[in-house]
Image (cartoon, rainbow, N blue to C red):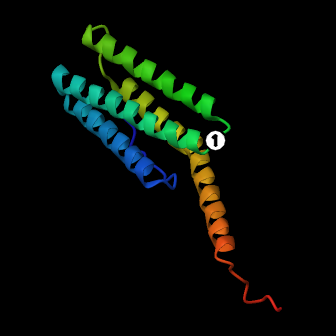
Amino acid sequence: MRERIYPVSVGHSDLDDDHRRLYGIADRLRGAITRGADDDILGTVLSDLADYTTYHFEREEFTLMRLDFAEYERHRQEHLALIDRLAALILKFERKVETVSAETMSFIDDWLHRHVEDYDRCLAVLLERQRQAQHAQATLATGYRSPDRKD
């Protein structure tokens, strides 16, 4: 299995905390697979991952809507696809059709890395622009004058 992939900051403390937590759950799953944990433990960790992923996506989508993110619908579809894939994986696992394997872990690692690095980096840029715009508005509202200005 692959080494842990560390998340990047998207500039929003709640979402960054969510990403760290998702990576932590992925680490727990990786450890359970490596130790050969029983199905009860694997099932619990998989459920934790699905539940927290859903929670995180709801928070992230709310933030994206607030920012009027141009790629919102595409981002949301990415979220829905992962939730569907996790739900199918859990169902197959519960029915003993599929096991949680290194291949499963690779999929989760790849998805987390791609989602945070590619999709959520856009969010970081938007959040920074929003902060800059708010700062500019606050500066104008207080009547800030440049020290270089002579009048």
User: Looking at the image, which residue sits at the far right?
Assistant: 151
In front: 55, or 107? 55
Which residue occupies the foreground of this view, 66 or 143? 143
User: Where is mark 1, residue-wise?
Assistant: 68
Q: Is residue 59 left or right of residue 77?
A: left
Position of 56 with respect to 114 (left or right) is: left
Q: Is residue 68 visible?
A: yes
Extreme-bottom residue of the structure: 150
**In the shown orientation, is residue 42 left or right of residue 144?**
left
Residue drawn at x 44%, y 19% is 85
| Image quadrant in which you'd find residue 142 | bottom right
Of the residues shown, which amino acid type is indicated by label 1? Asp
- How busy is the neighbourhood of tag 1: few (under 14 within 10 Å), some, or many (20 plus)? few
- Residue drawn 32% across the image and 12% down it: 91
- Give x and y (percent) for residue 89: 36, 17
Q: Is residue 143 above or below residue 100?
A: below
x 77%, y 89%: residue: 148
Locate residue 8, reporting x and y percent: 48, 51
- Locate the N terminus and report the quarter of the image it occupies: top left
